[in-house]
Image (tube, helix red, strand yellow):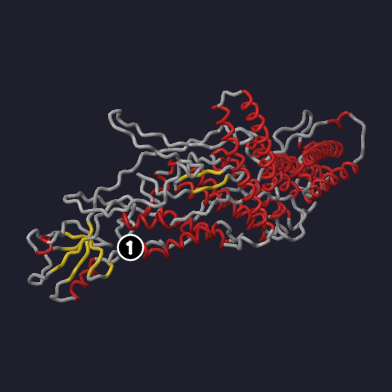
Amino acid sequence: GCNPLAETGRSKLQNQRAILNQQILRAVRMRAGAENLLRATTNNKVREQVLLELSFVNSDLQILKEELEGLNISVEVYQNTEETFSVPLVPLGLKETKEVDFTLPLKDFILEHYSEDSSEYEDEIADLMDLRQACRTPSRDEAGIEMLISYFLQLGYVENRFFPPTRHMGVLFTWYDSFTGVPVCQQNLLLEKASILFNIGALYTQIGTRCNRQTQAGLENAVDAFQRAAGVLSYLKETFTHTPSYDMSPAMLNVLVKMMLAQAQECVFEQIGLPGIRNEFFTLVKMTQEVAKVGEVYMLVNSAMNQEPVKENIPYSWSKLAQIKSDHYKALAHYFIATILCDHELQSGDDEDQQEKALSQLYDYMPEGLMVLTILKDKVQRKQLGKAHLRKAIVYHEEALRVCGLCKKLRNIDVLQEVLTAAHKRSLLKYAQQEMEDDFLSLIQAPDILPKTEHKIETIAPQFSKVKVKDLFHRLGPLTVFSAKQRWTAPRTIRIHHEAGELGFSLKGGSPVQIYCLDPVCSAASMGLKEGDYIVSVGGVDCKWLGVNEVLEKFKSVGEQPIEIEVISCQDTVASMHNKSATYSVGMQKTYSLICLAMEEDKIDQTKKAPLKLPFLSWGTKNRQKAASTLCLPSAVAGSSQIKKKLSPFTLLNTESSLY
């Protein structure tokens, strides 16, 4: 990861975000305490004081929210450092988190569940914590993306190794909402995985905004980055349902996906126009449809941003920027078609049919009394319709400038003001160049332009398989066998004696090998060897990853000498806990509400006592589980049935994603 103390513009913004998150957390706790006191007290004087305090806290929270919104719209920090004359693009800020100490919970679990010396895995645990720490400050390039994906994939292994579905590990994950600053605390690893996915998408947006949009390569990279950001956010929405954080709610993610695709479409238009837009009939027709498409997608983004429940939490300036871009690009579409009509008269050598077909594709309908072919041939009608389009372009330009002037955050972005003003002046100049005939047809209304693009923008799904990750805890054994879902007896030492060159049993399976066809009267069986036992060590050498042939070679290497092996027996597989969800509440007030989501209690027979369950979210130290656990080594269970289940680091990714 990057140096967290580096004085870059992006790191300063993230540091300010972290400070604001802490201030918001304190204010939320104060308000929660005041609300509790208000409900508990009956003293009128106390109630008056509490109500006064609540009003101060709510106003303070509103101010903090506005400051956080200011960070979210600090788009100029993320843009390319070179001088550009382009409308700014919007990146997502990275979600902030608190440090997590895996040491004690994982060491306890290794000793308790796997019956191994946990001190031998201190380096692996330290590597995991270092990787997580580095993911808090990823570099803004492909290396940063690869690091985040590596940690996300590593979490798949960690989840299956150490997080059984029947109980929590006592590891508390805290992540702050990117838009509201409200923290979400859970002992659920799925919160960690979802937040890392969000940050992968956010980092892609920052890479996209950093690209140099004055070059073809830079624009291609920007389009690719925004498509990949949309793909990651879409994957997050489909895979992790009922997330308890507003920035990862399905409605919010849907809006963010649309915004990233719109920005990709905007870069496609810039890419087409980068070599210069020739004042030629068919070139202008193509540019008209392309820029109209950009205006349409931003109009849809603005509409989605103004729907509940997103409207309450999306930065106000983002919504206004989408509206400004929609008006700006619609104005450009009308300007291009006005240029076609005003500057290009039908000549004798022109292909009349092709021009008529091209122009007719721009309109859904024509104004009453006008025909496309007639407009092409009649100079007066061409001028009048061209002026109508220019008037509409000027109206859109003025609306974009008006909205920009009303938003304090956008008003301070100089390059945005310059681009809007230059486009407005160009349309005014074009309109002034036309003859000003005073007739009724000059009041004709310009029809809407049909958007069309030859470059369809779609999401690019995340390609996790391209990042190769090695399980940090592979020494525990193959994940298909040694997982948190399966319980094992403590290793038992069996002394094997060769009887007339025979072992008294056969071996089968992959890694690790299993005892098969055990002779019940052989010496190994009398010492406690059972059918189906797994061999984990031969002669003091770990053999969890060895196959049948390799284990047999070790037996042959000792000749007729007795050899000690260590075996384990599979106990009952841990039953899957039924899906529990932390319900996402859409009714959060604009001034913040303390998120308090509790696990739904199991339905238990009234004759049995239900054990006390901890809530999913824990705000104080009072309700937190202690990191240390009572250690007890498992004992062998005779006659236990063997259950073998295929596992992978992504087993829980789809089947239990609703644990949120």
According to the picture, the residue beneath numbered tag 1 turns out to be: 117
Q: Residues within 10 Å of mark 1 (few under 14, many from 20)?
A: few
Residue name at image x 16 percent, y 57 percent: 530
Q: Is residue 35 above or below residue 289?
A: above
Q: Residue at x 41, y 56 (%)?
A: 104
Q: Where is residue 225 drawn, in percent x and y?
A: 60, 55
The quadrant of the image that shows the N terminus is: bottom right
Q: Is residue 475 above or below residue 224?
A: below
Q: Is residue 375 visible?
A: no
The image position of residue 602, as x and y in percent, is 36, 34
Asked if residue 198 shows in the view, the reply is yes
Q: Is residue 6 left or right of residue 250?
A: right
Q: Name the residue type under label 1.
A: Asp
- The residue lying toward the viewer, choosing from 312 and 277, is 312
- Is residue 168 toward the left or the right of residue 313 in the image? left
Along the viewing direction, whichever of 89 and 375 lies nearer the viewer? 89
Task: Give how far across and how far down residue 301 sits, in percent.
Answer: 65, 40
Q: Residue at x 28, y 51 (%)?
A: 487
Closer to the camera in the image, 443 or 506: 506
| Horizontal side of residue 490 vs 628, given as left or right | left
- Residue 60: percent from the left, percent from the top? 68, 38
Residue situated in front as seen by the camera: 503 or 433: 503
